[in-house]
Image (cartoon, rainbow, N blue to C red):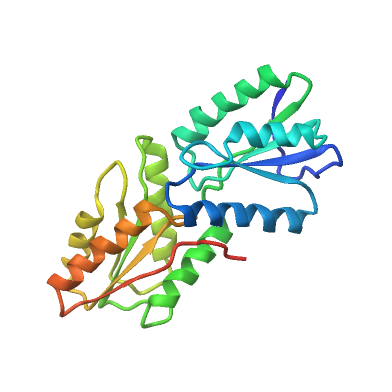
Amino acid sequence: MRMTSLSPLAQIAEDEAIVLMGHGSREKKGAEEFLAFAQHLSARLACPVYPGFLELADPPLANAIDDAVKGGARTIIALPWLLLGAGHAKNDMPVALEWAKQRHPEVTIRYGTPVELQPEILAVLGDRLADIDPQHGMGAPDTAVLLVQRGSSDPQANAEVYRVARFLWEGRNFSTIEVAFSGVTHPSVEEGIERCLKYNVRHVLVVPYYLYAGVLVDRISTTVDRFAADHPEIEFRVAPHMGLDP
């Protein structure tokens, strides 16, 4: 099996298939959203899309690769369907593909890249923000925004979240757009909300920077509810995650 990079202009041939690689979630709804997205993608591209999870949910990534080969694929386009290029995309998924190299030496795998910062992603986040903003997305000095991502041990991935926040802040009138992480690094969601409150705002808008539902997304709302109870003078709103946005 040859490992080659995937050109953004590449076309899907008849003997090619996409293996869509997700992280996986213990929450059933998140896994279902990912699988539904794979179905929509397959219909839109008019080609086979085989979804698989790295962990925590079925089908496993190994099964997705096997199914693609059984379906006649001689080239597999392996796409890490992750927002940021942290450890899973740099280490875990390539290891899984090395397993496939041993199991299916006759198949070529072309490894793609995570989603990262794309105009379409910024547009979706902007829509989510507009849905909960009293000023319909333009912001006001009495409103702070908190962008929440999972977080990583990879500093480059964490830095990308701050970059996204800056793009969301440009051209809008919010007092601030802060960043917090609901997973493994700081600032935590609690610390992020505290930073927003220092601006003496009347509204705090929390935007989850997540593709699908999961435990960490639920944790954001739980934390926000606690702060809302302690600060009844401030309006807190939480946007939905990206989900199955067209």
- Residue 73, above or below 230: above
Q: Residue lying farthest left?
A: 230
Residue drawn where x is 43% and y is 81% of the image: 136
Q: Is residue 147 visible?
A: yes
Front residue of this view, candidates 9 and 218: 218
Task: Residue 246: give x, y in percent of width and height.
Answer: 62, 66
Q: Residue lying farthest right?
A: 14
Residue drawn where x is 59% and y is 35% of the image: 61
Front residue of this view, candidates 45 and 163: 45
Quadrant of residue 72 in the image? Answer: top right
Quadrant of residue 102 in the image? Answer: top right
Residue drawn where x is 21% and y is 75% of the image: 201
**Is residue 139 shown left or right of residue 38?**
left
Residue drawn where x is 24% and y is 57% of the image: 192
Task: Residue 207: give x, y in percent of width and height.
Answer: 38, 64
Task: Residue 219: give x, y in percent of width and height.
Answer: 30, 56
- Residue 213, above or below 139: above
Q: How many marks?
A: 0
Front residue of this view, candidates 5 and 229: 229
- Residue 56, above or below 245: above
Q: Quadrant of the N terminus?
A: top right
Q: Is residue 111 visible?
A: no
Task: Residue 182: give x, y in percent of width and height.
Answer: 31, 50
- Residue 140, above or below 147: below
**Is residue 90 shown left or right of residue 52?**
left
Quadrant of residue 76 in the image? Answer: top right
**Is residue 120 shown left or right of residue 144?**
right
